[in-house]
Image: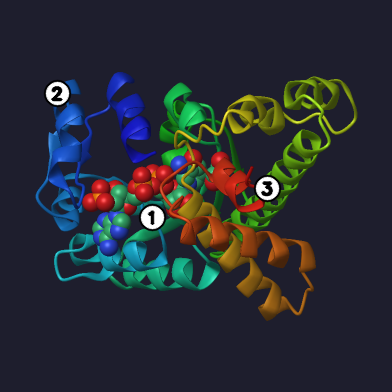
Amino acid sequence: MGYAMALNLVKAGYEVVVWNRSPAKCDALAAAGAQVAATPAEVVACCDITLAMLSDPEACLAVATAPDGAAAAMAPGKGYVDVSTVDAATAAAVAAAVRSAGGAYLEAPVSGSKGPAEQGQLIFLSAGDKQLFEAAAPLLEVMGKASFFLGDVGAGANMKLVVNMIMGSMMASWAEGLSLAKQCGLQQSDLVEVVKLGAIACPMFALKGPTMAEGQYAPAFPLKHQQKDMRLALALGDEMQQELPLAAAANELYKRARAAGYSDSDFSAVMEAVAKKD
Ligand SMILES: NC(=O)C1=CN([C@@H]2O[C@H](COP(=O)(O)OP(=O)(O)OC[C@H]3O[C@@H](n4cnc5c(N)ncnc54)[C@H](OP(=O)(O)O)[C@@H]3O)[C@@H](O)[C@H]2O)C=CC1
Ligand SMILES: O=CC(=O)O
């Protein structure tokens, strides 16, 4: 995700400085014109606005707060926009680290996968410092098709978790439907066509159905990240005393798929947790 988003900024003519824990992954961006930094702090030192796209809460905290992390070089006039999918507590901890160094903080997790990231069609779910949201708007416009400002720190994280909890349950349900169709002798391709025409038509079903029917799960949204989002959404449900029985059941399927070795496959590989073995 970070690669596609940074590449779009380079193509739009911005001076982009990149850092990644595994440095080789910066090579293609360097070839496209980006400058490569040695640490997150070096990125922040060079830039007015720093974007972070990282896997999970642990990664976000590490990159923000390590001795050579982003907060170490934060200063008044600089902004930190964390576009990773994390929980509100992590967003608050990163915001505190950035703000205590005088910087501004915006969380802006994205809805939309690898394709929308490449096409500049992401949806940003932002919260935090409104002035930074406004300052970063031209960048978000390059990378996305819509940007929401949802309020104080945590609101963007919570919105993203609600959205991805729904998506995870829908994908698990779609996997069950495709599997049941096959077991009763129906063509899965017919199910895809029928659903496409009716009231439960859904771009995700149309996009993923044909590849799921073939047992192909080339990663766009890695299954380990979907399971992380289910886990974080369920924790949010506990905190809010909101029952989430469907999401809890779906989470067990994602955990089963992870245990079966599908962590780095696309999240549609949840199919393997429900498909009856021949
Ligand atoms: N893929 C998708 O379709 C979408 C993903 N998201 C969310 O975006 C985020 C990124 O997703 P995606 O790009 O697919 O994930 P990837 O797993 O491809 O990339 C994760 C990135 O995090 C880095 N990272 C992980 N742990 C650490 C750490 N401890 N310290 C420093 N860097 C670390 C990785 O570095 P390294 O290269 O060294 O491993 C890598 O750059 C996730 O939160 C995900 O839920 C949101 C919308 C869509
Ligand atoms: O977080 C994943 C997505 O597709 O959105």
Residue drawn at (89%, 25%) of the image: 198
Q: Residue furthest right?
A: 199
Q: Position of residue 8 (x, y in %)?
A: 35, 25
Residue 143 shown left or right of residue 278 in the figure: left
In front: mark 2 or mark 1? 1
Q: Which residue is mark 2?
A: 31
Image mark for residue 276: 3
Q: Which residue is mark 1?
A: 55
Q: Position of residue 193 (x, y in %)?
A: 79, 20
Q: Secondary structure at mark 1?
A: loop
Q: Quadrant of the N terminus?
A: top left
- Quarter of the image for residue 213 reads top right
Which amino acid type corresponds to the residue marked 3 in the rendered image? Answer: Lys
User: Are the residues flagged by discs 2 and 1 in contact, CB closer than 8 Å?
Assistant: no
Q: Position of residue 157 (x, y in %)?
A: 56, 59
Q: CA distance from mark 3 to mark 1?
A: 31 Å
Q: Earlier in the sequence, mark 3 or mark 1?
A: 1
Between 35 and 189, the one lying in front of the other is 189
Q: Secondary structure at mark 3?
A: loop
